[in-house]
Amino acid sequence: MNWLSDPALAPIAQKVESGQRLNFEEGMQLFRTRDLNTLMRLANLRKTALHGDKVYFVHSMRLEFTNICYVGCTFCAFAAHKNEARAWDYTPEEVVAQVGRRYLPGITELHMSSGHHPNHKWEYYPAMVRALRESYPDLQVKAFTAAEIEHLSRISKKPTLDVLRELQAAGLSAMPGGGAEIFADRVRKQVAKNKVKAEKWLQIHSEAHSLGMRTNATMLYGHIETLEERLDHMHRLRELQDDSMARHGGGFHAFIPLAFQPLGNTLAQNLGKTEYTTGLDDLRNLAVARIYLDNFPHIKGYWVMIGSELTQVSLDWGVSDIDGTIQEEHIAHAAGATSPMKLSEQGMIRMIQHAGRLPVLRDAYYNELETFPAQHEAAD
Ligand code: V47
């Protein structure tokens, strides 16, 4: 049976079936089509060609060492002024103690990103990474967005490449994908005008790749951006990934769309952007990303921002990674995320199994630690 109902998708389907790359206009057709069934099938085809039935997750911990931040991104409800009662700011020793408080056996990844603190000296950052590695040598530290690295370059007066090198020497394993927001200037000026510029964000990731570090890339969508601006964002990432793969043998592990959470931030209040993204927008976005970003190993469905139910559905829409158990998350929850603060390992396994997929526990480097049996029925 031929399921295709949008004739414009016929040449695109042929390209996807034969593993060819889509051009920008074809990417836009995917964003515009109402033939969601074909979109889903094409995304699933690309995902299956890469990973079969496997879906990856990590036993992880999230830690934000401070919420004090001077940058003023309009989508952010997490940042606090240092005099506010809700502000926190941990010393390296307190960071280690916080990790101890959240620690569970088997956790391999510690994901940290935080505010741009106005007063910390450069030395604070490598000292924190070193203290963590000394107390928890088995934890892989994935920390500091490109925006934070640029901030560290400014306060240390060191080039960003040296900042990365020194953090890597202190024990930094990988970088998260935050701070990318939307690259297009028109949007960036309105949502993150004091933050790292798009070109610099990309340069910092390129530098990290040159040091053999693997990184992620995010895209904050569902606010004032157009669909063209979403695809432009993906396009710039695809170009950098081509370059990093050619020059350094690899670069980005995963692309993670971040659905805008609309509470308690000025973007929501001033521009009336008070609605959550819709389920089909989330799924479409993931599917387009899977098809367009043909050189990215993984597209992540981020259960914190789209909920675990939709994340489970997204496993048919190109998603091959569902992030981790997390323990405690504050950035999305400050802005109205309705998901729980954490998931259990068992809960993540069940979510994947009940979607008829094969759960694979990974670490921050995507080493496969354990594979769980597939289970095609929704019963334990
Ligand atoms: O950098 C902030 C975004 C990011 C809101 O690399 C918001 O594996 C939606 O980067 N609505 C932090 N998004 C989270 C992040 C991340 C998450 C999961 C996995 C990985 C990874 C990285 O959250 C920030 C910013 O882009 N953000 N406020 C909001 N209201």
Image (cartoon, rainbow, N blue to C red):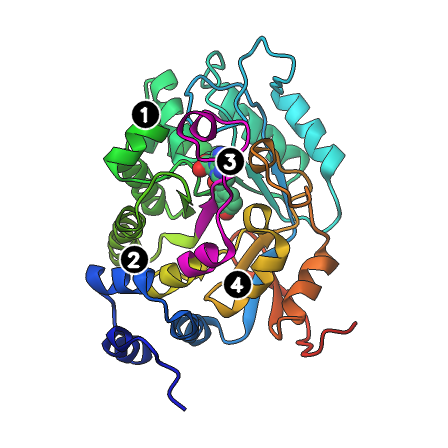
Dot in front, 3 or 4: 3
Q: Amino acid at mark 1?
A: Lys
Q: Nearer the viewer, residue 199 or 122?
A: 199
Mark 2 in CB contact with mark 1 (< 8 angstroms) = no
Label located before the other in sequence (1 or 4):
1
Tell me the residue that label 3 is attached to.
262
Mark 2 in CB contact with mark 3 (< 8 angstroms) = no
Q: CA distance from mark 4 to mark 2?
A: 27 Å
For image coordinates 52% across by 39% down, the residue present is 261
Mark 3 in CB contact with mark 1 (< 8 angstroms) = no
Label located before the other in sequence (3 or 4):
3
Q: Tell me: residue 214, above or below residue 35.
A: above
Ligand 1 near label 3 (Cβ, under 8 Å)? yes
Residue neighbourhood size for the residue with mark 2, other residues' Cα within 10 Å, grouped as few (<14), some (14–19), many (≥20): some
Tell me the residue that label 4 is attached to.
314
Residue 290, position as x, y percentages in the image: 39, 63
Label located before the other in sequence (2 or 3):
2
For image coordinates 53% across by 59% down, the residue present is 321
Dot in front, 3 or 1: 3
Residue 329 visible: yes
| Span shown in magenta | 256-285
